[in-house]
Amino acid sequence: MSKQYETVIGLEVHVELATNTKIFCGCSTEFGGAPNTHTCPVCTGMPGSLPVLNKQVVEYAVAVGLATNCSITQNCKFDRKNYFYPDNPQNYQISQLYLPICRDGHVEIETDGGTKSVGIHEIHMEEDAGKLIHDEWEDCSLVDYNRSGVPLIEIVSEPDMRSADEVVAYLEKLRLIIQYLGASDCKLQEGSMRADVNLSVREAGAEEFGTRTEMKNLNSFKAIRRAIEGETDRQIALLEEGREVTQETRRWDDTKEKSYPMRSKEDAQDYRYFPDPDLVPVIISDEWIEQIRDAQPELRDEKRRRYKETYGLPDYDIDIITGSKHLANIFEATIDHGAEAKEVSNWLMGETMRLVNDSEMDLTDISFAPEHLAALIGMVKKNEINRKVAKEVFEKIFKEDVDPKAYVEEHGLKSMNDEGALKETITQIVSGNPKSVEDYKAGKKKAMGFLVGQTMKATQGKADPGVVNKILKEILESL
Amino acid sequence: MGILDLTALELGRKIKAKEISAVEAVQAVLEQTKKAEPAVHAYVSYDEESALKRAEEVQKKIDDGTLTGPLAGVPVAVKDNICTKGYKTTCSSRILENFVPTYAAQAVENLIAAGVVIIGKTNMDEFAMGSTTETSAFGPTKNPWNQEHVPGGSSGGSAAAVAAGECFMALGSDTGGSIRQPSSFCGITGMKPTYGTISRYGLIAYGSSLDQIGPMAKDVSDCAALLEASASYDKKDSTSIERDEYDFTSALVDDVKGMKIGIPKDYFGEGLDPEVREAVMAAARTLEKKGAVVEEFDLGLVDYAIPAYYVIASAEASSNLSRFDGIKYGYRAKGAEGLHDMYKKTRSGGFGPEVKRRIMLGSFVLSSGYYDAYYLKALRTKALIKQEFDKAFASYDLILGPAAPTTAPKLGESLSDPIKMYLGDIYTISANLAGLPGISVPCGKDSKGLPIGLQLLGDCFQEKKLIRAAYAFEQTRTYEAPEIVKGGVQ
C-alpha cells in the first residue's frame, strides 16, 4: 500500500426499549412466546385498527437523549415509512423522519488514543417488525408478529469514528448509558441492540468523505470489529486498483469473515415518508423533561465516585463492577445482605467473571441471589468452610442458585475445625510417614506440603488448611 | 300508519311502550328489504337470522329493564367499511370479500350498548372512493326514488337503505362528503360531525385525517339521537376528542331567532343546477322568515379545496391501503410466483380502477422530489382553508349552501369523467379539510322528482347549532318517502 488511508465510520444503532408493552398497543414485549401470541389487531395491521403511543417509550427516548447531551424536540411527530415486506403488517413502519425526538448530542469515549467526543446526529422512535421464518420442509414462509410493534430507538451518530476501537468504545458507552437508565438490556446477541456500520475510506488528510457502504447483520462486538477491518481492507483494495467504491448496503457474514452486497443505491426504495395522520404530535413540556431528568437513576460516573468514597475500592475493581449495571446491582445487593465490600468485589471479579467467560454468557444473564453470595462470604469469614470448598459452593450458587448453608450441610462440606479430632488424624499421618518427617527435620520444607496434602485427603478437603498447618507444625516441632 | 312510516325515535318510543316489539320492527324491515333489494341493492350483506335473534335478546333486555335508551330495538344498517365483530366487512372490495373482523368499531360497540339491532352492511364505493356507489365491486346501489339514478356516494348504500325503509337509520362515513351528498340525493338527513367526535377505531381508513363516521336517518331528530349514541371519547383513537358534552338531542329546538347564517357567494356560481339553487335559496328564505339573519359573504379559497383534498386523501389512502397485500387476510391471487408477483397479482386483481387511480395518485404526490410540490403544498392549503372558515365563523353561526351542485345523476354518467365527478364534491369537501361539522337536510325536489339537499356547516364542536337550525327548518316540511316504501317498486 503506497498511500495512507483513513477510515471514516458512523453508526446507526437500534435499541429495543425495555417497556412491558409495545409502542402502539397493549401487547406484551416479552421475548419468546409461541408465534403470534403477543399480538392484537393493531400490531398485526388489521384494517380499522389504530395506533396509540406508549408514553413510556417517549420517556425512555428522552432519558437517553438527555444522557447523551441531545436537545429534545418538544413538538415531535411520527412519520410513516412505506415499503412492502411481509414482516411489516401495515406495509409501512411508523418511525420519525421530519421531527425526531432528540437531536445534536454527543458522548465522550476513551480509547488508547485518548478521549474523544462522538456526535449524535439524532435519536428517533420507531416500531420493530415481525419475524419471517422460512420452512424449508414445506417450502413456505411463515410470519411471527410477536416482535411487531416492539419499541425501538435508533441512535444515529455523526461520521466521527476512525477505527474499530473507537466504534467499540462508542457502543460500550451507549450500552452502559442505556443499561444504567434501565431503558434497555442492550444485548447484541439477542438483538436488543443492533448496529449498522456506515464506513468509507479516504486518503489521510483529505477533506471530502469517500463513498460509503452500510453493513448490516453485526451481532457481537467481535463481529463489528472484524467487519470494520474487513470492509476497510476491501475498500482500500478497490481504490488501490483504481476502482470505485459502490454506495450500497452489504451484509456481513461473520463465519466467512466477508461482506456481500445486499442492495445498491440504485435499488434504494422511495419510502414516501409522510406524517402519520393516525397519531397526534407529541408535545413534551419543560416540566415533563424535568420530571424525566429527576427520575434518572445514578449513572456510572456518579456510581464510581460513590464506590470510591463509601467502600474505598481500588479503581480497577470499580471499573469492572460499574462496567455493567447488573453487576453493580449484584454488588450493592450483596453488601446490603451484610457482606464486606472488598470481599464481594473479589468474588465478582474473580470467580464470577471466570464462570461468565467459561460459559460465554452475557453479564446481564447472571441470575444468582445476592443473599446467597453474602451468606457464602459469611461462612468463609467464620471459618465454617475453607476457600477451596467455598469456590465449589459458589459454582453451585452461580449455576443453580443454591442456598449455600443448606448445600454445605447436605453435602457435609463444613470445615473440620475441631482441633482435637484433627490432631488425632495428623498424628496418625505423621507416624505413618517417617520418611517425610525425616526430610522435614533435614530442612526440606516441601515435606511439610506433602503432609498437609495427606491430611486434606484424609479429611476429604474439609479441614481448614491454616489450622492443619498450625497443628502439623506443632507436632513436627515437638518430635 | 305502518311501522315503516315511523321515525327511529317514534319506533323506539312504541317499543318502550310495548306497542311494537323489537322483533316486529325487525321483521317489518326485513320484509321491506327482501322486497326492495332486487331494485335498490343497498346492502352488501344482511343476515335475517342473526338480526331476529338479536331482536329477541334486545326485547328481553327491554322487558327486564336493562335497556332503556331511545334507540333500543331500532333496526340499524352499518356502512361496510365499519368493522362488525364476527361479521363480514368488505369495503365493497374484492380484496376484503371474505374478511371477518375479530373486533367491532367503537361506534358499533356504542350502538350495540344502546340496544340497536344491526340488520346488515351497506354498499358503498370501493374503500369509500367515489361519489355514486358505482365503484363497488359488488354492483351499484340504485336510488330508491328512481332506479335509473345513483344514490350518491360513497355511503350510497346507507342512504338508500334509510330512504327505502330497509332500516330506520344507518351509519355512514364522510371523507369528502360521503354522508351529506348521498343523503341529499336520497332525500334523507345525514350529518358529518366534527373530526374526532365519533371514534375512528374500526373504521377502515381511506383518508385518516379526513374520515369521520356519522349518522344518516329520516330526520334531524333521529340523526341527533344516532350521533348521541355513537359518539364517545375513545382512547384507542389518538385523534378522538374528549368533548364537554354529548347531549346532542337537547338542541332539537324550533328556534333560529337571531342566528346568523352566511351564504358563500362562491357556492352559487358556475356549475350549480338552477333547480338546486332555487330550492336552497328558498330554504334560506324560510330560515330568515323564522328569525335568522341571513346574508351573503365571500368565502375564499373555494376553488382550492378539491385539488388539496384529492392530494391529501389520495396520499393517505396510498399508505392506508398498502396493508391489503394478500399476506394476512382477504383476497390472495392464485398462481403467483414469488412474493412480488403475489403482491402484484393480488392488488391488481383485488382493487378496482378508481382505487388504483387514487393509490397511484397518492404514491406519486408522496414520492421524493414531488412531496414538497404536492403534499406539503396541499397541507398548507388545508391550513389556509381552515383560516378562511375561522374568519367566516367569527361573523356567522352557520354557513348555508347546497350539498351538491346537482341532483342524483344517472347510473353510468359519472365514472366516464372522473374529474367532473371530483368537482361534484365542491360544497362538501371543505368541511373535511377544516374538520367542521355539516348536515344535509331535504329541501325539495327537482322537476324529475329527485331530492335536493340543503347543507349547513358549523364551526368545530358547534353541532348543536347545526341541529337546531336544521330542526327548525325541518318543522316547515314533512318527511317524504319514495314510492318503494309504500309498496310499488318503480
Image (tube, helix red, strand yellow):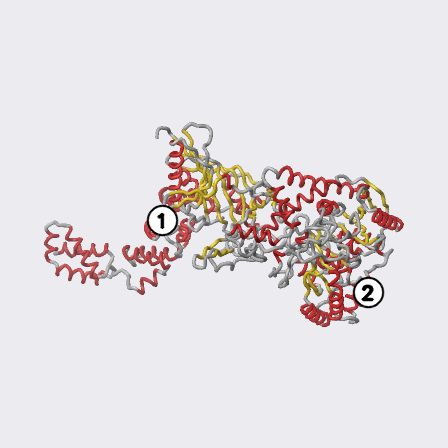
Q: Which amino acid does label 1 sit on?
A: Ser
Quadrant in which the N terminus of chain A is drawn: top left
Q: In the rendering, at what x and y percent does residue A170 appear?
A: 43, 40
Q: Which of B179 and B380 is in front in this view?
A: B179
> Label 2: how many residues lie within 10 Å, few (<14), some (14-19) or many (20+)?
some
Q: Is residue B356 above or below residue B373?
A: below
In three-dimensional space, the C-alpha distance between marks 2 and 1, rounded to whole angstroms, equals 92 Å
Q: In the rendering, at what x and y percent does residue A26 appear?
A: 56, 56
Determine if marks 2 and 1 fall on one subunit: no
> Which disc, if any, is residue A345?
1
Residue A364 appears anywhere in the view? yes
Please identify the residue farthest to the right as the structure is shown. Answer: B289
> Which disc, if any, is residue B486?
2
> Which disc, if any, is residue B288?
none
Q: In which quarter of the image is residue B451?
A: bottom right
In front: mark 2 or mark 1? 2
Q: Is disc 2 placed on a helix, strand or loop?
A: helix
